[in-house]
Amino acid sequence: MRYEHKVAIITGGTKGIGAGCVRAFVGAGARVVFCSQHAGEGDAMAAELSARGPGTARFVQCDVSRVADIEHLVAQTVAWYGQIDCLINNAGWHPPHRPIDDFSADEFRALLDLNLVSVFAAARAALPYLRKTHGNIINIGSLVGSMGQLHATTYVATKGAVIALTKALAIDEAAHDVRVNAVSPGNIFTPLWQEAIDAADDPARARADGDAAQLLGRMGTPDEAGALCLFLAAEATFTTGVDHLLTGGAELAYGRKTRKA
Ligand code: NAD
């Protein structure tokens, strides 16, 4: 797959799924601008990937919970390259699992800013440029946004809303030939998943259960996520408003789901 001379913004590209996307797009010849909330965190990665090519990568500090930071990320990209062809809204977080009683409304509001309002704000800032290039947006949702998850009310709500926003925006932006899709991972082995393993009572069991949740018997990789996103951006030109499940079949078949002993 080729994406030469195209310009892509990828939020949260220093680790996990976002890093898989950065590698895939640089490998296809794109000029990538990626961010994290930590100053300088992606500088070494940007230098290494640019040296390897064929595309290039540049890092910008941006906390996607802050709309001003997102606007700066977009403005900096346009100052460097004068165009935007693809926006991947990937940055997000899954808080540790808890029943609803143990989440506060303020925690929920902060998670909405990080996982949902950021998607809206980045799309709004980038769309004037994406309309000119007939570009596309890829929002990273989650399988649990459509099927739910134990002790994850706030996270599931943010991701369900990301999928709904994707469909609504695809309708509006079709008038400008901008495609808007979601990619909803099931279990992809990333530093975020490692956080969940570390927080579990039985970490080895948590990892084994994570692998066993898929028909394919393993978690996905960040590079597999990058490959799907690159395909959506570069090749899937008749696809818009679709929630693409990247799950290894995790949503299929019955499992033992009762919450009663
Ligand atoms: P990760 O924690 O491994 O990496 C997250 C990336 O986002 C990092 O680069 C981090 O610096 C960045 N980030 C976090 N908060 C940020 C902020 N405020 N501003 C800017 N950047 C920020 O996570 P991951 O597993 O790669 O997840 C990436 C996305 O995929 C998230 O939206 C997550 O909800 C979603 N997702 C992941 C899985 C999975 O199994 N890993 C499953 C479903 C959905």
Image: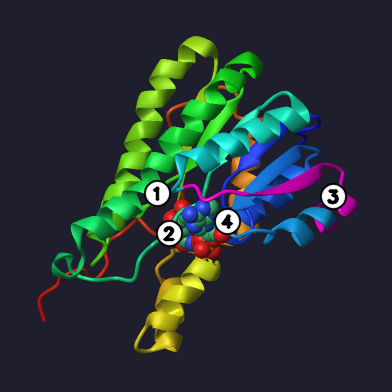
Tell me which residue sits at (56%, 40%) in the image.
88
Q: Say which residue label 4 marks.
A: 17
Please name the amino acid that badge 2 sits on: Trp
Q: Secondary structure at mark 3?
A: helix
In this rendering, the label closer to the viewer, 4 or 2:
2
Residue for badge 1:
115
Neighbour tally class for label 2: few under 14, some 14-19, many 20 plus, Cα within 10 Å: few
As drawn, the label of residue 50 is: 3
Q: Residue at x 30, y 44 (%)?
A: 160
Give the amino acid type for the residue marked by disc 4 in the picture. Answer: Ile
* Residue position for label 2: 93
Q: Are marks 3 and 2 in contact (CB under 8 Å)?
A: no
| Pointer 3 local density, CA inside 10 Å: few below 14, some 14–19, many at least 20 | some
- Pointer 1: residues within 10 angstroms few (<14), some, or many (20+)? many
SS at circle 2:
loop
Percent from the top left, x then y, of residue 24? 71, 48
Residue at (16, 64) in percent of width and height: 100
Colouring mode (rainbow / by chain / secondary structure / one colour):
rainbow
Q: Which residues are magenta?
A: 48-64
